[in-house]
Image (spheres, rainbow, N blue to C red):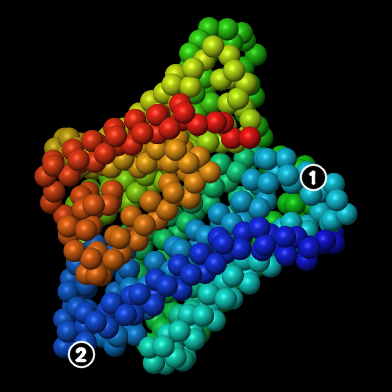
Amino acid sequence: MRAGAWVLVRFIARRDRGLIVLWIGVAVALPLFNAYSLAALLPTEETRAAFAGMSADNPITRALLGPVHGTSIESLVAWRSGVQSLLITGLGGLLFAIRHTRAEEDSGRGELVAARPVGRHAVVTAVTVLVAAVNLAVTALLTVALSLGFGYPIGGTLLFALTVGAGGLAFAACGLLAAQICQSAALARGAGVGVLVAGLVPGVVVPESWIGVFPAGWPRLAQAYGAERWWVPLVPLGFAAGFTVVVFALSSRRDLGAGLLPDRAGSTGPVRGRLGSPLALVWRLRGGQVVGWTVALGTAAAGVGWVSASFELATLTGHTLLAIFTYVFCMVVACLTVAGTLRPYTEESRGRAGPLLAAPTTRARWLGGHTALSLAAPVAMLLAVGLGSGAGNALGTGSVAPLLTQVGAALFFVPAAWAIAGLTIAAYGLRPRAAVPVAWAAVVVSAGCVALWEAGTIGDAAFLLTPFGYVHPSISSGFVTPAAFAVVAAALVVAGGAGFARRDLLA
């Protein structure tokens, strides 16, 4: 059943060697950067104690990262890096797992591999081995770098690294499970990222006594350089083992290229008149996805708004909770905007754009249809976030004031979302093969700048240059910055359209 797995391990490792090195490098570099920057910012015990007190008094920081368990430099680094490192290893693991399972089946390459003398579980086994090797490398490199390079205690360093590596394995196994259940790679990625966000955000609302059930609580419970609870890494390892067993069981039962969830039945009526323009075709391809995202975000935002109306802790008010989640929803919308805006690249790379453009449909109209929906989708999703969170809070408080406030706060992110979409369109039009890494790198770098700004490593001016800067709950920004992002978005869209009009289609 696993014959040929070792050959696939070497093939995948060679094919994605650049991505694997980048994955390991970013996962290791973030804690090392925090160690270097915090050591420079907090050279004495007095400054570290003041920083710990300030962080404990900041409701946003405390809600996202948890309480500070010590004032030593290594404790502060582990506290600052725990959730961030889990986000990197988890996101990398689940996307890597889906890329080499569900995505390969969607493209037809999985069927070619299955036609060779390989076992039914060979691909899943190879991906599991590679993900385990990557997280083992991250664990080893973090332990060596922090203990030898910075002089941290070896015990606490190993516990911190094991927690991060085991968490990455758990999310990778979740990605494998999503690949077995969902009908497409896009749905699997959406489900996997949703689980990742749901696992790391509950630290905001879940009581501290229950936080260990969620991934956000694993670094808090471990308390590297403090209480040092060595059993904590066994929790994510248990999740990983359980998910993997289920994945192997499902892999032996489902058909190749199919998911466990049934495919949506198509229309039995005539389609003439429905596809009268490129925009109508784009809506048929992506409209259901946009509606689904919008409804899901609006529903989740309504729940958050309702909870925030009666939420009150010593260090976290309902208003602060609502601001935090609105910011998180904006970041989710940015990711969904990138995923949707990359659809023209998918259509072209799979050969579906060529026959369409050989007809009277012009390139400008075809790309214009995709661009129009890519710019309208974040507006709809952010409006749903604002209406949902505002309506939920208004129902809980009996006041309609939060409704208008939340709609304005959510729509304030629209220019930044347009800038992200514009960058994706420009990369696709000018350098289509670089569109995917460029678009996602922009989101990852912007999210990384959030952590750098919160750590005091970069200033407000640099942070405001990123899409996630001017909407941060702790920043009061005028209308100049969002207006500038809107202008940049327009310029990028024009550049992408001009580049697409001149270049050849992908072979």
Q: Could you tell me residue 143's position as x and y percent?
A: 49, 84
* Up/down of 121 relative to 497, above or below: below
- Is residue 448 or residue 242 the one in the foreground? 448
Query: Is disc 2 surrounded by few (<14), some (14 to 19) or many (20+) residues within 10 Å?
Result: few
* Up/down of 203 relative to 338, above or below: below
- Name the residue beneath numbered marker 1: 112
Spatial CA distance of label 1 from label 2 is 61 Å
Residue sitting at x 34%, y 85%: 74
> In the rendered image, which quarter is residue 254 located in?
top right
Q: Residue furthest right?
A: 117
Residue sitting at x 45%, y 84%: 145
Please state which amino acid type lies under the numbered disc 1.
Answer: Leu
Q: Quadrant of the C terminus?
A: top right
Query: For the residue labelled by badge 1, is the local secondary structure a helix, a strand or a loop?
Result: helix
Residue sitting at x 73%, y 44%: 109
Q: Could you tell me residue 91's position as x and y percent?
A: 49, 58
Q: Could you tell me residue 6's position as x and y percent?
A: 78, 66
Q: Could you tell me residue 356's position as x and y percent?
A: 58, 19
Question: Looking at the image, can residue 370 be seen?
Answer: yes
Rendered image: mark on residue 45:
2
Q: Would residue 167 be found to the left or right of residue 486 on screen? A: right
Please state which amino acid type lies under the numbered disc 2.
Answer: Glu
- Is residue 365 or residue 218 the one in the foreground? 365
Q: Would residue 506 be found to the left or right of residue 422 on screen? A: right
Front: mark 1 or 2: 1
Rendered image: mark on residue 444:
none
* First reached walking from the N terminus: tag 1 or tag 2: 2
- Is residue 91 or residue 263 the one in the foreground? 91
Question: Looking at the image, can residue 288 be seen?
Answer: no
Mark 1–mark 2 CB contact (< 8 Å) = no
* Up/down of 495 relative to 465, above or below: above
Residue sitting at x 22%, y 69%: 456
